[in-house]
Amino acid sequence: MGWFVGLARKDERTLVFVYAMHDEKREESYAGLREKAALMARLPAFLEGR
């Protein structure tokens, strides 16, 4: 299980987020690091309101 918590600001907008990941099987890397990478790829679209 991994967590990624953060805050992002763009102009007048603030986005607070908490992402949690629970793997069904044991993985090589930490879930929190994988979740952070996935979120960072999606963050621009969130900030643009998509």
Image (cartoon, helix red, strand yellow):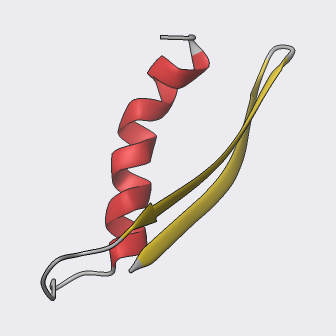
Q: Position of residue 28 (x, y in %)?
A: 16, 86
Residue at (16, 77) in percent of width and height:
24
Answer with left or right where residue 15 lies relative to residue 49: right
Q: Quadrant of residue 31 in the image?
A: bottom left
Work out which residue is located at the far right of the displayed protein and give it.
Answer: 12
Direction from residue 24 to residue 9 in the image, left or right: right
For the residue pair 22 and 13, the one nearer the viewer reads as: 22
Q: How many marks?
A: 0
24 or 4, which lies in front? 24
Q: Is 31 on the left or on the right of 32, as rendered?
A: left
Is 45 above or below relative to 8?
Answer: above
Is residue 47 depicted above or below 19 in this figure?
above
- Picture quarter containing residue 16? top right
- Which residue does the image show at 34% across and 48% down from the upper left? 38
Q: Quadrant of the N terminus?
A: bottom left
Please say if 14 is above or below 11.
below
Query: Residue 8's x, y, as percent?
Result: 71, 37
**In the depicted structure, whether residue 12 falls above or below residue 18:** above
Q: Is residue 9 left or right of residue 48?
A: right
| Residue 17: percent from left, percent from top | 64, 47
Residue 27 position, x and y percent, is 16, 83
Depth check: give the residue in front, 49 or 37: 49
State the residue at coordinates (40%, 32%): 42
Residue at (87% x, 15% y) in the render:
12
